[in-house]
Image (spheres, rainbow, N blue to C red):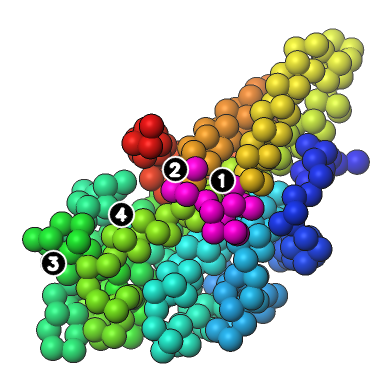
Amino acid sequence: MATNPTDVLGLPKPAWAGEDVGMLYDMAHRFMSEEILPHYDAFEKNEMVDRSSWEKAGAAGLLCASMPEEYGGSGGTFAHESAIIEAIGHVGVDGFGIALHNSIVAPYILHYGSEEQKKKWLPKMATGELIGAIAMTEPGAGSDLQGVKTRAEKNGNQYRINGSKTFITNGQHANLIILVTKTDPAQGAKGTSLIVVETDEVEGFERGRNLDKIGLKANDTSELFFNDVRVPTSNLLGQEEGQGFVQLMQQLPQERLQIGTGAIAMIERALAETIDYVKERKAFGKAILDFQNTQFKLAELKTEATIGRVFYNDCVARHISGGLDPVTASMAKYWLSDLQCKIVDECLQLFGGYGYMNEYPIARMFRDARVQRIYGGTNEIMKLLIARSL
């Protein structure tokens, strides 16, 4: 009988994971197992999840779970988003990019959008008619968002946008993109604004390559080009220009916590898969688990994973109550993603040569985990942010 990733640590459920959150997890786990996993190898080969899967997720109530019901969402909290992300990680369909859509893109519209913007965009995001992306990174500007060059110039009641972005998650599918631009380059960070581009309604927008990554192959990650793209000035997020950098800083803690969600889910799945394997695989006439080295190694990994889960649960509780500060969120992002890469690597070692074979899930986890230490701000940047609090 396979070890269940949710049971591998044997911890009690945190207070934020109530009955409704548990029911959503079960439903999301079933949906990912039945609707996504059977096609996931094809999605990896095609380097994107098909659009119909997004629409099915919307119909199942798995898009915009934390958005208010009046805007088409389910009226939940980040606890509900965590349940969905954990189900994705436990099933092993990590390339399905609904976490970014749900708990990064949609919250920008909820928190900074006008009533008209929220009513226009959020219900369509909840059904999957609109797929969201946020375009921050440029060829010359990654973790340093102040280095953004994409320019939005006001021309009457329109913005004329020119620039390029890269490494954009959901980039091939996205038709609602929150674009980080400079509306006043002379002002530096204070000249940064967030502008929403509905790609189905503009000219001059081009999608570049679906980038060839070493992991998360099923997630479309793209170059985007904006060549005299014109959008209404009413697509600005916020009441005035120049608020973009502050808006980004306010929302980055949830993005970084979400990276921690994916990390702890994969950690638990890696341990579950490895425990099953070492119980069944034999060497020198006995199960791999019977060797003391295996027992000691798994004891170390389970201990570290338990510490990680307890820390993560505390961060979610603090976030739901409004008390997760940027420094602690940076700690969660850096430490949990580092731990994820370490534990997956150690687990792969216990598979021996089979761990290097693509047919074994641990191999895919090894590839998929690595980017976690890079996006959402590199772990080196996280340490700088933490150090400033000393």
Q: In 3D space, how far apart are the residues under numbered discs 4 and 3 (Cα atoms)?
A: 18 Å
Q: Please give the residue where the numbered disc 4 appears in the rendered image.
A: 137
If you read the primary sequence from the N terminus, does the residue marked by circle 2 or circle 4 appear first?
A: 4
Q: Quadrant of residue 245?
A: bottom left
Q: Quadrant of residue 289?
A: top right
If you read the primary sequence from the N terminus, does the residue marked by circle 1 or circle 3 appear first?
A: 3
Q: Quadrant of the C terminus?
A: top left
Instruction: Provide the secondary structure element on which disc 1 rests.
Output: helix
Front position in the image: 265 or 209: 265
If you read the primary sequence from the N terminus, does the residue marked by circle 2 or circle 3 appear first?
A: 3
Residue 238: % across, % down: 32, 75
Choose mark 2 or mark 3, whichever is in front. 2
| Side of 105 where 63 appears, left or right | right
Q: Name the residue type under label 3.
A: Asp
Q: Name the residue type under label 4.
A: Thr
Q: Of all residues shown, which one is farthest toward the left?
A: 186
Q: Is residue 371 visible?
A: no
Choose mark 2 or mark 4, whichever is in front. 2
Q: Name the residue type under label 1.
A: Gly
Q: Residue at x 56, y 45 (%)?
A: 260
Q: Please give the residue where the numbered disc 1 appears in the rendered image.
A: 260
Q: In 3D space, how far apart are the residues under numbered discs 2 and 1 (Cα atoms)?
A: 14 Å
- Does 323 appear in magenta? yes
> What label sits on residue 184 in the rendered view?
3
Sort mark 4 into few (<14), some (14-19) or many (20+) by Cα contacts within 10 Å: many
Instruction: Provide the secondary structure element on which disc 2 rests.
Output: helix
Choose mark 4 or mark 3, whichever is in front. 3
Q: Residue at x 24, y 84 (%)?
A: 233
